[in-house]
Amino acid sequence: MTRARTLLVAGTASHVGKSTVAAGLCRLLADRGVDVAPFKAQNMSNNARAVARATGDGFGEIGVSQYVQARAAGIPATTDHNPVLLKPRGEGESQLVIDGEAVGHFAAGDYYETHWDRAREAAEAAHDRLARGHDVIVAEGAGSIAEINLHHRDLANLETARFAGRGASETRRNGRVAEPGGVDIVLVADIERGGVFASLVGTLELLPDDVRERVAGAVITKFRGDRSLLADGLDTFEERTGVPVLGVLPYDDPGLPEEDSVSLPAAGEADVWGADDGVSEDRSVTVAVPRFPRASNVTDVEPLARVPGVRVGFVPLDASLESADAVLLTGTKNTVDDAIAARDAGLYKQLRAFDGPVVGLCGGYQLLGERLTNADVESTGDTEAVEGVGLLPIETRFSPDKTVEAVERDLSGCGPLAGASGAVSGYEIHMGDSRLVGDAERPFDDDGAAVDDVFGTYLHALFENRTAREAFVDTVYTSAGRVRPETEGKEESPYERAAELVAEIDLDALGLES
């Protein structure tokens, strides 16, 4: 059986557009009839999804970008698409997830000294399974491929390039060696930062020889203006390095979920998403999102920010909520310590006095309850009970067991989601279980609680479901006493927008002729 070709989308730095390019290539190739799959050997993100485990029954966790890329490729996401996931939890520690299963919490040094070899074996095995089942693998690198201090343990970049290219049969194409079962590296650089040619040349200079020879071309992202002004620079770069520029991509945001917290304001700072939709302020509403220090799965709020008229405003824990029309509490990697931080900052008092819809998702749901018990508190090292906000009659007890599953449920609208009904889908990733200790409506048979204008659930991706999203937005507008603006037409799929964005990349030069 012929092994898949691997395109490794590597970057000169973090946040240069690798995830978007990889997703766009997945959709573009799938639209052309290519059997394509995404891959990222090692990811670091608190934005995760529950997907089917590739090596056993049940569900496991992968980074949200590989889930998105699998959807772009038109295939079910599995743990093979991201076999190693590191979920930062503060204090220099991350939870290590291998093949979808949580292994433990480790400092960086402990991970590299004790668990990296196992992680590498899992990553290579996952890639090998994908390579036997698909024609092309679009692999995403991490950060910069030229971090020379990490070259001996760079799993997502150098090690991926090496094990993806092992055992390939070589054929000649366009004057360079192309490997149907091998790997081609596409180097991505962001021109918006400035110094794009210096970053490209410097990256190439710092690559090990065996990896440098696999670089098939470069892609420049986030370009604004007249491309002809780049002509001299492109020519000089190609002459100096022998590496062709495969495409110059315009600045655009297709609307794909964010991979990590780079796009979030720092704890203690504010930011607003969705304010560039052309809706006037008197026709808009603001959903305040208190910025937890250990926030996770913040992608849950992105569908709301894409609704015309809705502003998602991230605010510090001690900020006033007086100007907000609703409040949404996101997930957190450590509910207990973020609950203590929220209480000490005065957020509890503000939430109890808030006169409007309040929604808590996962850790935010736990925090809205009366108590958190059997909780490990990082700041004290003790196990103790911690007070919740007390807006929902639930009590959460923590244990070493972790729930990870993709789910479909029937939603019975209640609280801020009154009027919603029907099947919804999403996923659960959480420690601890919550039980009702008082009277409340249940939005789902075995999950969630609602009292008046307060609603909580463990279901991530709730607002990706139209019935839940529309019901909540309608409630927020009604509560705020504003008229919701009418919208026309259907928003284009972010996967198609990503494919259009990368359509300029010269796939012929990569041996992927249309």
Image: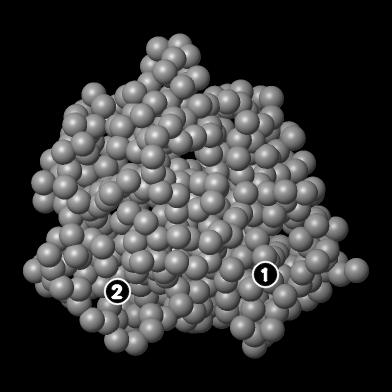
Residue projecting furthest to the right: 1
Q: Residue at x 30, y 70 (%)?
A: 307
Q: Residue at x 23, y 81 (%)?
A: 486
Compared across the picture, whether 28 is left or right of 365 comes to right
| Residue 75 numbered tag | 1
Secondary element type, mark 2: loop
Whichever of labels 2 and 1 marks the residue nearer the N terminus, that label is 1
Which kind of residue does numbered mark 1 sit on? Answer: Ile
Q: Residue at x 20, y 73 (%)?
A: 484
Which kind of residue does numbered mark 2 sit on? Answer: Arg
Q: Residue 301's spot in the image, x, y percent? A: 36, 56
The reply to whether residue 239 is in sight is no
Q: Residue 60's spot in the image, x, y percent? A: 66, 47
Q: Residues within 10 Å of mark 2 (few under 14, many from 20)?
A: few
Q: Is residue 333 above or below residue 490?
A: above
Compared across the picture, whether 166 is left or right of 446 comes to right
Q: Residue 2's spot in the image, x, y percent? A: 86, 69
Residue marked by disc 2 = 224
Which marked residue is nearer to the observer: mark 2 or mark 1?
Answer: 1
Q: Residue at x 40, y 49 (%)?
A: 441
Q: Is residue 423 above or below residue 260?
A: below
Compared across the picture, whether 246 is left or right of 215 comes to left
Compared across the picture, whether 386 is left or right of 238 comes to left
